Amino acid sequence: MALLALATPAGTAHAANGFLVIDGTEHEDPSGCYRLGDFAPSKVANHTDDTVWVWSGTNCDGHGTQRITPGETAIGRGRSVYVE
């Protein structure tokens, strides 16, 4: 539980280096919250230097459901992702 508390979205001024791909759409030097698909789990490829957190809510709220580490591609089982 403490691990997810540290990953709670907070206002941060820096962006991750690299790119995040969500269902084929590339986001260069991502920062903050991105919505995932509404009807099917989304494919998330983390090509950044930061961890991406998947959240149950659409605005990076609710509870953390998984983390996607740098270099990892996974099916995001939630409604949004947050880039640290």
Image: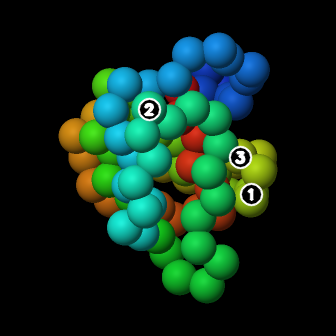
52 lies above or below 24: above
* Amino acid type assigned to the residue bearing label 3 in the image: Cys
Q: Nearer the viewer, residue 57 or 63?
A: 57
CB contact under 8 Å: marks 1 and 2: no
Q: Residue at x 73, y 23 (%)?
A: 10
Q: CA distance from mark 2 to mark 3?
A: 18 Å
CB contact under 8 Å: marks 3 and 1: yes
37 lies above or below 72: below
Q: Residue at x 65, y 15 (%)?
A: 13
* Amino acid type assigned to the residue bearing label 2 in the image: Asp
Residue topped by disc 3:
60
Describe residue 19's horizontal placement relative to residue 56 as left or right.
Answer: left
How many residues crowd around disc 3 within 10 Å: few (fewer than 14), some, or many (20 or more)?
many
Question: Which type of secondary structure does the marked residue at label 3 adopt?
Answer: loop
Residue 28 falls in image quadrant: top left
Residue topped by disc 2:
29
Q: Residue at x 50, y 36 (%)?
A: 30
59 lies above or below 43: above
Could you say where residue 80 lies in the image, as x and y percent from the top left? 63, 55
Could you say where residue 48 lies in the image, as x and y percent from the top left? 33, 33
Q: CA distance from mark 3 to mark 1?
A: 6 Å
Question: Which type of secondary structure does the marked residue at label 2 adopt?
Answer: loop
Q: CA distance from mark 1 to mark 2?
A: 23 Å
Residue topped by disc 1:
57
* Amino acid type assigned to the residue bearing label 1 in the image: Gly
* Mark 1 or mark 2, whichever is nearer to me: 2
